[in-house]
Amino acid sequence: MRDWWHKGFKVGPDYCPPSAEVGEAWIDSNDPSVKATGDVDYAHWWTVFNDPVLNELVYTAYQENLPLKIAAWRIMEARYQLGVARGYLLPQEQQAIGSFMRTQMSHEAFPVSKFSQIPGFKMAYDDWLGGLTASWELDFWGRYRRMIEAAEANVQAQEEDYNAALVLLQAEVASTYIQLRELDERLDLARKNVALQRDTLAIARARFEQGIVSQLDVHQAQAILSNTESMIPMLESMRRVAENRLCTLLGQPPQDLDPILGAQGKIPTVPPDVVVGIPADLLRRRPDVRRAERLAAAQCAKIGVAEAEFYPHIAITGQLAWQAENFSDLFGSSAFTGMIGPGFRWNILNYGRIRNNVLMEDARFRQAILGYQETVLRAAEEAEDMITAFLMEQRRLRALEQATEATAQASQLAVAQYQQGLIDFQRVIDSQRALVQQQDALAESRGKVALNLIAVYKALGGGWEMRRNPTAGVILTQLQTVQKSQGGQAQSPAPTPAEAPQPAPPASPFKREPEKSQSLPPAAPPQPALDGQEQQTPPAPMPESPMAPPAQELPQAPANLPPAPSPSESSSRQNPSLPVLPAQGEVGEIGISG
């Protein structure tokens, strides 16, 4: 009873965030390319590539991606479930009742037949009834308040699930774009090698026609040329697959993206180092870790719900009604009737079943705790793997650059010496075949370095914070481009548009214009509070959520920026495919050990 009193008239355990073992530093923290601190904007990490097209792709995918919209509607579903749970604190049954009954008694049935001959005794009569009934089970043991705790934690878990979907979306968009640019480079190199080998074939034919060499040189030159030409259709097919994947991420049917992406470009420049922070940051930043912790909190509350079944259910029931034989007399004061009274319902002799139900919920809670700790371990493993892959691929890239440069010079010398008759044609073929392989491997390695950097930021859990200011990444790259064109230095952290006037980003070429019947008011996407931060952006218009508390307002982005649309209550019902962005949610501080 003392625990019940101190817990605020609730049975069951009070939740305490679990601890998780994390390392004090990364394994490769001594590498000069791995930094614990530095200028990095995790909310817009893709801006490190300084590629305006990539920024537009990420921004458009944030607005149009369908799985992300589904995740947003799951948040709304969880909020409505929270509203249902909160409603149980009020009278659970509230009904308006009404009835009419015409009764005709038998003249032959006993004992009524004995009274049928009595003057004035009615054998037929009407009965009109109208009123209200209510039943209110008092939350004496905290059963309904534990249900609310579980529902609130579930809402926050769904918000973290949305954040995880956003992080995954950003990484997929960036990775697909890098793959496109990598294939562009490989195609360009293949076409250049085809042109080079055609020149070599022409030299071999000329020497054959002069009688200097045999026809074997011509056939060998034609074979290596055809083999290089066969790479082009394969690379073009891979590029089309990447384009189709990018279209799906943008919420569009497959189409030719060349007019949007521009001419075939190069792989964006990758910075030589990466700022990774410390391992404990994963617990505060990674949405999947935060989601696992919230699921554990929800399961802990369910133990209290199950434990409340040990105790009696205390309720108050009542009825207010008007009852009369004639309808004209129904609402008179003399027709009033009613009843009210407390009662209880106690599931006795079922303690074995109730106890096992409590133990079952407790076992599920222990599973959730272990699942959370396993998620932390896997997060650290993924981050370590990606950091290592990024560093090792950088070393491989430097070796391939040297090998490619040496192979290119060897190929040039081989052709020149062949023209002079100093070497046979086999040396030329070997050098050109090696050049094709080395250049293709070099382009592939450059792409892998960029892809591994993307995987590092994904493993660190960065990117979902862009909901606070979706257009900041577009603005930052514009500033970097302007500063580089003027010979200045680009700034790393993303600026807040409200702090200083910024140039407006161009209209996104990926955005589909909505129909007039689906036009929406502009609104900036909201962002949940994080780890005690007080600032929150105002929620975007969305289906009314009576349980959502008002958020504090922050300065808005300039009016000339393209806003991220959010549905109003009416428009969301007309077109549920439009984006719905979560409004609030806060995760408590997580215990860290190690």
Image: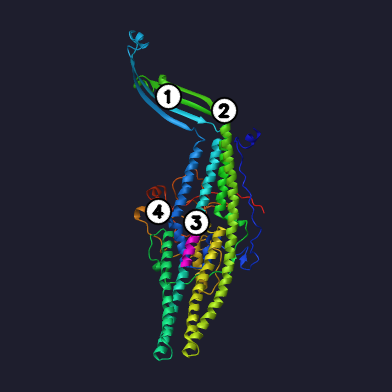
| Earlier residue among tags 1 and 3 | 3
**Residue assigned mark 2:** 349
Q: CA distance from mark 2 to mark 1?
A: 37 Å
What label does residue 428 carry, if any? Answer: none
The N terminus: image quadrant: top right
Q: How is the image coloured?
A: rainbow
Disc 4 residue type? Leu
Determine whether label 1 and label 3 are within 8 Å by CB. Answer: no
358 or 454, which is in the foreground? 358
Q: Nearer the viewer, residue 112 or 466?
A: 112
Q: Report the residue marked by disc 3.
A: 166
Question: Which residue position holds label 4?
Answer: 520
Task: Report the span colored magenta.
Answer: 166-179
Quarter of the figure with the C terminus: bottom right
What residue type is disc 3 on? Leu
Classed neighbour count for the residue bearing mark 3: other residues with Cα under 10 Å, few (<14), some (14–19), many (≥20): many
Q: Can residue 65 be seen at all in this image of the molecule?
A: yes
Q: Closer to us: mark 4 or mark 2?
A: 2
Where 311 falls versus 504 (above or below)? above
